[in-house]
Every structure is written in C-alpha cells, then in structure tokens.
Image: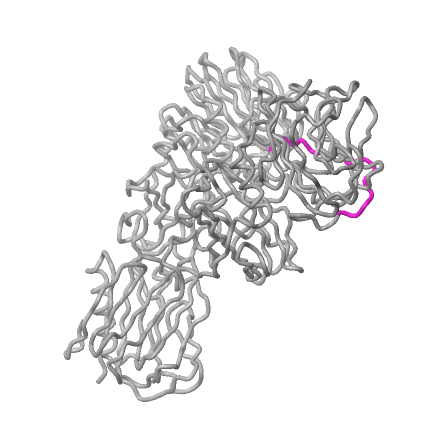
Amino acid sequence: MFKYLNINISKYRKKAEKKIALLIDIKNKNIKKWQKFSKKQKIQYAGAGFLILIALLSLSFYFFYNRSAEADWFDDGWHYRRKLTFNNASSTENLANFPVLVSLNSSRIDYSNTQDSGQDIRFTDPNGIILKYEIEEWNESGTSTVWVKIPQIDAGSTIDYIYMYYGNPDASDGQDMENVWDSDFKMVQHLQEASTSTDAYVDSTSNNYDGTATSSFAAANLDATGKIDGANDFDGTDDWIDIGASYDGVKTVEFWIEADNTTKDIIDLNGSAYISVSSGNATTTGFTSPTIYVNGVATTTIDTTWRYAAVTTGTGLNASDLDIGRREGGTYFDGIIDEVRISSAARSGEWIEAQYKSMTDTYITYGSEENQEGAIVVWHFNEGSGSVAYDDSNYDNDLSISGASWITGKFGNALSFDGDDVASTSDAASLDMGTQDWSISTWLKTSASATSTIIEKSGSSVAWLGTWSKRIEITASNTNVDNDLTQFPVLLKLGTSVGTNSADVSAVFDELQSDDNRTKIAVTKSDGTTELYVEIEKWDDANEQAVLWVSRSGWVLDADAPTTLYLYYDSSQADNTIYVGDVNSTPGAAVWDANYKGVYHLGEAVNTDAGGYKDSTSNNNDGTGVSMALTAPSAKIGIGQEFDGTADYITLPFTLATPYALEVWGKPDSLALGAVLLSQALTDTTGGGVAMGYYNTSNEILVGNNTLRRGLSGISTYLTAGTWQYWVDVVAANNNIIFYLDGVDKGTGTAVNYWSNDSGKATIAARCVGAAYSRFFDGSIDEVRISNTARSATWIKANYYTQTDGLVSWGSEEQKQGYKLEALASGVVRATIASATTTLTVDSSNTV
C-alpha cells in the first residue's frame, strides 16, 4: 500500500505545514507537472550537495527548504537577502553613523528578483532593525549605487555586518535620503543630475543646499562618468556649479577629482577660503592649520587619475558663497568632479580612510544569496522509461537511475528499487541544506520491514567553511610537542605519499587542475571555519606536489591533545588571496610570528639578482646571491640551493643582537676545514662574529665566535657527508649557547669573546672577514631562519618533526554535511540531520 510521507524539520512549522497542504491539494488534483515559480518566487542557494535515492518505491518526491539562518528573517514579505560584512581592521576608531557605499551588480544581486527601480530593497542590522538608505542610481544592466547609514562599525572589526533584503513585489519605496547623512553633514552633492535647470543638483542632506550648473556646460560634460556614478566634467574655462550655501562652521570638505590640469582652483567657500591644486599638489587658502588627505592618507599629491581629497580644520569656515569648479576671481577647474561633501565636524583620519575604502569598493564583502523558503527538487517519476528522472523545480537536479525499474505508481508511473538500486544527482549548490530547516514529502510503499535508506545526502556533520565543496581533516600529533606553541608554523606537504600515514592527497590536484588555481584552498582551525594563513612555498600541479606553511597569530599547537586542522579545496571558489599567498606575499608573511627576522625557503631559481632570494616575513630582508651557478636541487623540504665550496654564497641585509636563534638544514658534499653554513661578521671591516660550520677534519661541529673557536665545550658530535641535518644555534642575552642537531640538545656552554651586537654582513654558505669572503660551504642548504628570540627546546623539537613531515597525518576527503532518511520498520521512518534525530510514524490514514 502506498503511504504519503511528509517529514518536516523546521522552527517555522506553521509555514511548512501550509506549504505541504498545497502539495496534497496538487496531488489530489493529479497534476503531473509542477508549476514553475514566477520571477519573484525563484529560489537561489549557494553550496554543494550529492543526493541519492535508495530502496524506494515512490511517486512525486518533493524537497522543500525553509531557511533558519544565523539571524531571524526580518519580514516574511521579503524572499531574499545577502550578508554584507565590513572590513574595518585598520581602524582604531569606532565609526558612528557612518555612510557606506553599497555597489551592486549582477554578481551581488539578482535583478530578476527585485522591483524595476529597487523599491523593495531594504537594509537591516543583525537584529532586524531597518537602516536608513539612499539610492543614488538603480541600473539593472550595470552598477547600482546605494548609500546606507550604519549606526556603528567597531574599531578593528572584520565581522560587523548588515543584511540587504529584496524580493518583495508588493513593497513600496523605503528610502530616507536625508537621514542617511548625520547632522554633521551640511551638504552632500552626488553630482549625478546632468541638468542646467535651477537647483537641479540636489543636496542629499536636509539643508537643501542645492546647486545650479552654468549654461556653459556642454551636454556631454553634464553627464560624465564619475568615480561613483554620474559626475560633471568641467572645461577649465567657464563651467561651474553655484551652490550659494550660507553656513558658518565648515570643518571638513571632501570630493573626488580626475584632473586634466593639475594647477587649478577646485572649490571656493567664500572667495577667500578655497581649495586648489597647484603643480600636482592639493593646497588650501584661508584654512587654519588644515590637514590634507589624498586617497585616505595624509598627503597632498594630485595627478591626472581619480583622487579622493579631504581637507579638515579645527576652526570652522564660513561657506557663504560656495562654488564647485572655480574660485571667484580665480581659475576654473579642468577635469571631472564627483561626490562633494562639507561637514561641520573635523572628520578623523580613520573616518576618511574608511570612506576612501568604502567609495573604492574595498570595504564590504558580499555574501551569497539566501532565500526564505521554496521547492529545491520535485521528482514526479512520470517519465515511465529511460535512465533519467527529471527535476521539475527551477534547479534541474535530475536523477541518474542505476538499476531501478519503472512501474505503475500511486499516480501515473513510479520507480521500483530492489535494495541495491540507486538513483542519484550530481553535485549541486541548491542541494546543500546544511543544518537549516527543511521538509520532504513523498508517496512510498515498502515491500519489507527491514531497515533501509530512503534518501541520504553525503557529507560530514562537522562545521563547514562557507560554500567550499571539499576538505580533508589533518591531525597534528602532540607526541613531540612538549608544551603549547603559539603561532607555530606547521608544514603541510601535498602529494601521493605524505604525512606520518603516507597518505595520498592527490585529490586536491584532481580538483584544482592547474597551478593557477593554487590559491583556491583554505586551511582552518579545528572549528572548521576560522581560517589560518597559508604560504605556498611550492605548487607543482603536473607532478602533484606542494609545500605549504600554515599558522596565524594566537593559534595554538596543543601539547596535551592532537590539534585538528582542515584543508579545503574547490576550483569553483574565487582566489582566496586574503588568507593564501605565495612566498613574499601579505598572507604568506602572516604565517610567521614577529620574532622571525628572516625566513628563507631558498626555492628560487639560481640567480644573482639584488634581493633575488626572498624573505618570507614582512621584514623584506631579501638575500642576494653571489657567483651562484649550480642548479637548485630538490632539498629537504622543497627546493634548496647548491653551493660549490669555492666562491658562491648569499648575503643577507641585517644584523644580529642577542638573544637570537639560527636555523638551517645542511647536507655537505665534503667536510672542509672551517666550512660555514651561516655566519655574521662583527663589522664589515673587522670580520669575526658568529659562524656555524665544521671545526676540523674530524667532522666536529663548530659553533664559533670571532676566532672561529668552537664556543661550546664538551661537544663532540660527528657529521656524515651526504646527509641532511637540522642545525640550530640558540644564544641567550647572557651569551649562554645551546646547540641542537636534528631537534636534540647537543650541549650548552658560554662563549669566549662572544658577540652581542654584530653589525657586519650576514652570509649563507660563507664567512665575511673584512671585505673578503672565505670558509665556503660545499653542499646543499635549505630552510634558513633567523629569529630575534631564544627559541625554546619545545619549539626546535617540534620544528624538526614538522619539517621532516613527521608531525601531521591526513584523513579522507569529505563533502558537506547533509541529511538521511531510513525506513526502520513497517510504518516507521527516522529522519537525521547532523546530530539531531526525529522519529515519525506513518499510520493507515496516510498522514504523519
């Protein structure tokens, strides 16, 4: 007997039941084609999914979605929203009543889901409070320009956000233009009007300081392309806009200009107080102790490209006869002017910098479209033949049938499964329900009471990073981590046999396909969502090998328990350049803590260019090769450098002072007397200083001072040519020396005539004495690091294990979390979503 099964897991059960009742009505009418949604009812959702039907005998399978997102929906009349997140990281000031520019295009809003002039757009804070906004321009074929007043953006925040709602065909225009601009704004001219009519240029504030353009403007110049929207192109002869304001107390003037001539007057407040550009510099006359900003920075340089200029003063000025584009009795501006504002407050540098970022579209991250509710899949199973069951929703999540056979169903046709048959979709964004509210309804008839799966979605129940489709769990063992380590750089090698479990993680390369996609990865902490910074030392898609370094400020490698990380990868994502970068990049530098003075992977092609060997830290202490000629070999970690022992070396542009730590991987081809891996002279003329190398032909390790003495007593460690070894020399402020080999403490001593503030040349693979170099190293060197702190034994030991790929193990590939339905017994169905379980019973009346 066929049973009608409806399963709903939702905080909004009343709405879901109403939708399901509609389904029942449709089935009772035996409608065989699901009605497509109208423009305003279409559903959009971002993510990834994989859906399977197993052991099912059914007709008309419906999957509905009712999203319960991180904040409640502010009004049921609006069907869509996006999260807009602000990046105020560089600001030390809370920005109150701050107007932000929201620039919309087809990638940030689906215009097919809005009214023709944006009448249904709304902005709310996270609590659903509607915010003031002004639409400067609505352009469904291009860019729409909207200004939104934000009550407060916290200093240093990268998580403050608002919501943009749309998709309500019955909504009326909700703009409140005048109240977008706080009481300190005395005039805001967007200059998009393109008219010479009286007062055609409307002041967006409530002060009504409207303007009139002179009739001398050419028609095309009234409608010039501005920095933000429309603007005016002033001819430098007789074009200007008369505002005629009368306000005493102006302390900030802002505007955008693209100058054709960099010696002209720009804005005149009253005939004696004005702003000009002179020989490529912004200047003021009549301002008391002004501060001039260009592009958010305190500078005066103006060229012929778009520039955002702001002038502040602590002494209010009288704008009694405000002219834009000229100084009365002076010169006329030649170029384009956009977005002119005057304020009664002296805006701070933080405010002006944030305004610049806002108006250059670098301040907001636009989230994916969220929908309120609707049908995600509709399978009628009415085809009756073939290997495809078509989805009649808007998403085309068609099923590929494997083994199931067509039979007569409750209404029309159905599919019959024998326990091994499968019907499945391919990956699809619309099928990613996460842990949000959803409901399923179908007709089914079971032929056995044994437990069998009806529908499941593959994936993990662990928190997931956004819409990334795939990830692998990484476990950093605590076995060789004796104490907690903060911002410790962990090595992740990718390949066919990596980590302590010799894992094959080539699936990463299978997904990304090319070196160009190397930044379409992310590494997170154990929560699955907090990203670490990633430096890519090496990425070789063709040979499926990569070397990554990961960490971030405040992240802890745990000594008491294993530390979990996740590597995400998805070729459909945008480049993750905020958190992932190559050597010498900003995100790459964020891996290394502030105590690193220089980190050299030495993975560059052999070169003698100035600064050709890059420092991975933000210090930019790049090294320069001298007489480098041998091909760089495969090294201990990635690519290293080969030295011939006669004349080649690398100089480093910094000096040492105790305490510090020197680290290097070395593999000598021969053990020459006094050969040096890493050194620094006392001065550029006297030589001496610190050197790590070989003391004598007995292969004894040298950790020397200015006479190349051992500096440590009682050490008799012997080396073998052709073997990679990890050397670390730690010198405390009291000249106490500890030498480590392969992560193990090999002895402690006090230096004789040791260095404490060397200022000469630092060198890899040689020693500088005066202007001459000697003690050349014969062999390979990799991964040189210099720190201005005495690294702990725990740090050095863990470094040895991570750099030998002996710290982490790899799990299997995962996909996003999903849902599963199981028939437990006759008439009993269990629905599972993430870790929550609900059991429902089907009775003889076909209700749930």
Task: Residue 446: give x, y in percent of width and height.
Answer: 26, 82
Task: Residue 86: give x, y in percent of width and height.
Answer: 43, 38
Q: Quadrant of the N terminus?
A: bottom left
| Quarter of the image where one finds residue 732 | top right
Q: Main secondary structure of the magenta part?
A: loop
Q: Quadrant of the C terminus?
A: bottom left
Task: Residue 201: give x, y in percent of width and height.
Answer: 46, 33
- Is residue 620 highlighted in magenta? yes
Identify the magenta region. Answer: 618-632
Q: Residue at x 42, y 84 (%)?
A: 403
- Count of marks overlaid on the render: 0
| Quarter of the image where one finds residue 183 | top left
Q: Residue at x 43, y 81 (%)?
A: 402
93 or 765, nearer to the observer: 765
Q: Is residue 601 visible?
A: no
| Quarter of the image where one finds residue 392 | bottom left
Q: Left or right of 433: which side holds 675?
A: right
